[in-house]
Each structure stands twice: as C-alpha cells, then as structure tokens.
Image (cartoon, rainbow, N blue to C red):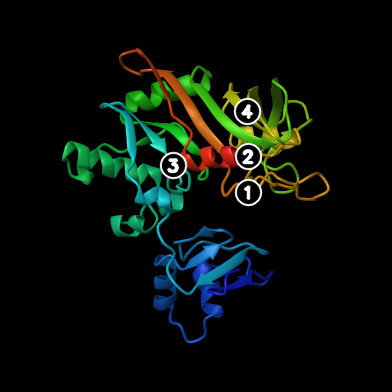
Amino acid sequence: MSRNTHSWLVSPEQAGQTLAAVVRSHLPGQSWKQVRQHILSRRVKIGDELCLDPARRVNEGETIAFLNQSAKLPRAVRHPLVIRYLDEHVVVVEKPSGISTVRHPAEREWDVKRRELSPTLEDRVQAAIASQQHVPLRLLPRLRIVQRLDKETSGLVVFARSPLAEVELGRQFRKHTVIRRYLALIPGFLPAQTIRSRLVRDRGDRRRGSTNLPEVGKEAVTHIEVAERLPGFTLLSCRLETGRTHQIRIHLAEAGHPICGERVYNRRDNGEIMADESGAKRLALHAIELGFVHPVTEAPMHWTMEMPEDMRELIESLKG
C-alpha cells in the first residue's frame, strides 16, 4: 500500500460487519457521521476497488484501505461518452475501461448526488441522452439492461430503452444470434479453436469455472481465432456463441493463457499465480464488434470499435 494509505485485514470477528463499523473501529474518536462521510467521499477501498456503501458487509480476509485523500474520479468518467446509435428503443455506446456497466442492486436507491461520486456507464448514458435531447433526466425512460461488460473491459454495449426492445433483445441474446466479438491479449500462443465447457458459479475456490460433472452448470462456447502474433504474446479474436459471466476470461485462463492484466482467473490448480510479464495496467479485453436485429424495425444493425489507446500502446510496446 502507498504511504498515503492505512490498510487492515478483516478479521474473523469482523466478518459480516458493515464497512462503516470496521472503518470506525480503526479510527478512534471518529463519529458514525464522520466515518460515513469518509466512505462517501471516495476515501475507502475494499481490495483494489473504491466502496461508497457504508452498509456493505465485509468478508474475512478482505483488505480495507483508508486513503488520506479522496480518490480522483477514474479517467473513464472524466472523458466524454461516445454514443454510436440512439433511438426510442435502443442505445449503443462505447464503454471505456474502468467503469461499471450497471449499478449494484443495493445502490439502486442512491440519489443523484451520491451516484455522481461513483457513476456507472448506465448513469453516464442517461446523462448524455438528457443533454443531447435537452430533456430533464427524470423524464427519460429508464435504461433496461440486456448486456454487461466487466468494469475493466472496454467496448460496445447496447441498452434497451423500451419494454419491447428489452424483450426482443433478450430473446436474441438467449438464442445466441447477437454478434459479439472481442479482442484479448494473452501470454504465449493459443491456436484457433472452439472451447466448450459447462460453467458453474463456484468451482470449489469461490470462483467461477468449468465443471466436468454432466448436466451441471451452463453451457459456454467461445470461438477463438488468432488476430496477431507478437513476441511472446498473442492477440486473439474471440467470438461468443454463448455469453456467460466472465466466459472468455475463464476459458482462456483454463487453457493456460489468462488474459494479460487478469487478477482473478490467474491461478493454477495448486494456487500458484501465473506470471504476467506484459505490463498490462488493466484487463486487456475489448469488445470490438456488436451486431443484432433492431427489435422494432427488424433492420440488421452492426458496429465495430477500434481498440482504445491503452491497449494499442501495450501491443506496440510488446512488439518492440
């Protein structure tokens, strides 16, 4: 941890307590009001992530960090949002790395001021639409979630803006007719192939993964091609047939090639962390292509998005 940070491990006795209670136990003399304000002011992390929910229950072994200064808003929030398509039924946007797609259900009731402390892509899309259409935010129809990208993953995302679009896009996702292609940078070389497995929520170490048990879990299919070979690394093109949570990350990690910048699915069966010499500052995964049939007009819709600057720079550095 930085010299500007105090950190503590959650003890077995503290497991299940609220974040505010644990922080207050390490800050003698601080009132409940002061502790809650510290948390809402972007001064408390759980692991590597800021947490703005004083009522969040903590788990044994988690690291809580108290920052001497409020953390800055992430770069993904400071830069303008790019809307690629917008009508009354759907909106397609370019998601930068470093921002959550949607808000956690426990945070749904947060007021606007509190949301602005840690905006999600969903929040930013609504604000951008309100600004573009000169409409008060409260008068906009709510966004309906049909697709998610991990916080560190960049790329194209679609939201539904009407009940009809939500139902129809949901049907297309379930039928696996939506085009979703990603670029993933991995160490070593993995030839073109199709990876099929059944994914479960907990493979035995509290992480998602594949199981060999028949009829257990959900089928996951990833089609992989080689986009570019680099010295010691490979840029893969991964097309999703199914879209399970963390599917590409799990499949590549279980194949022995966790995505560069991976911090969750990067351990061998014996618990050893697999080396990552890429220098990636975030998960090197980008949703480059998205396509579906418009839920109302039935017109085919298709977009591609260039790799963001940080991934391009990483690849160029590895070439050198």
The picture quadrant where one finds residue 127 is top left
The label on residue 205 is none
Mark 2 or 4: the one toward you: 2
The picture quadrant where one finds residue 253 is top right
Q: Residue furthest front?
A: 320
Residue 95 position, x and y percent, is: 42, 38
Measuring 56% from the left and 30% from the top, which residue is drawn there?
183
Residue topped by disc 2: 320
Camera-side residue of 191 and 90:
191
Residue 246 position, x and y percent, is: 60, 37
- Alpha carbon distance from label 4 to label 3: 20 Å
Q: Name which of mark 2 and mark 1 comes first in the sequence.
A: 1
Residue topped by disc 1: 279
* Dot 1: element: loop
* Dot 2: element: loop
Kind of residue indicated by mark 3:
Pro
Contact? badges 4 and 3 (CB < 8 Å) = no
Mark 1 or 4: the one toward you: 1
Kind of residue indicated by mark 4:
Leu
Which quarter shows the N terminus? bottom right
Residue topped by disc 3: 96
Q: Name which of mark 3 and mark 2 comes first in the sequence.
A: 3
- Alpha carbon distance from label 1 to label 4: 18 Å
Please give left or right for residue 152 compared with residue 96 in the image: right
Residue 5 position, x and y percent, is: 55, 72
- Alpha carbon distance from label 2 to label 1: 13 Å
* Dot 4: element: strand
- Alpha carbon distance from label 3 to label 2: 26 Å
Measuring 30% from the left and 14% from the top, which residue is drawn there?
297
Q: Name which of mark 1 and mark 3 comes first in the sequence.
A: 3
Q: Name which of mark 4 and mark 3 comes first in the sequence.
A: 3
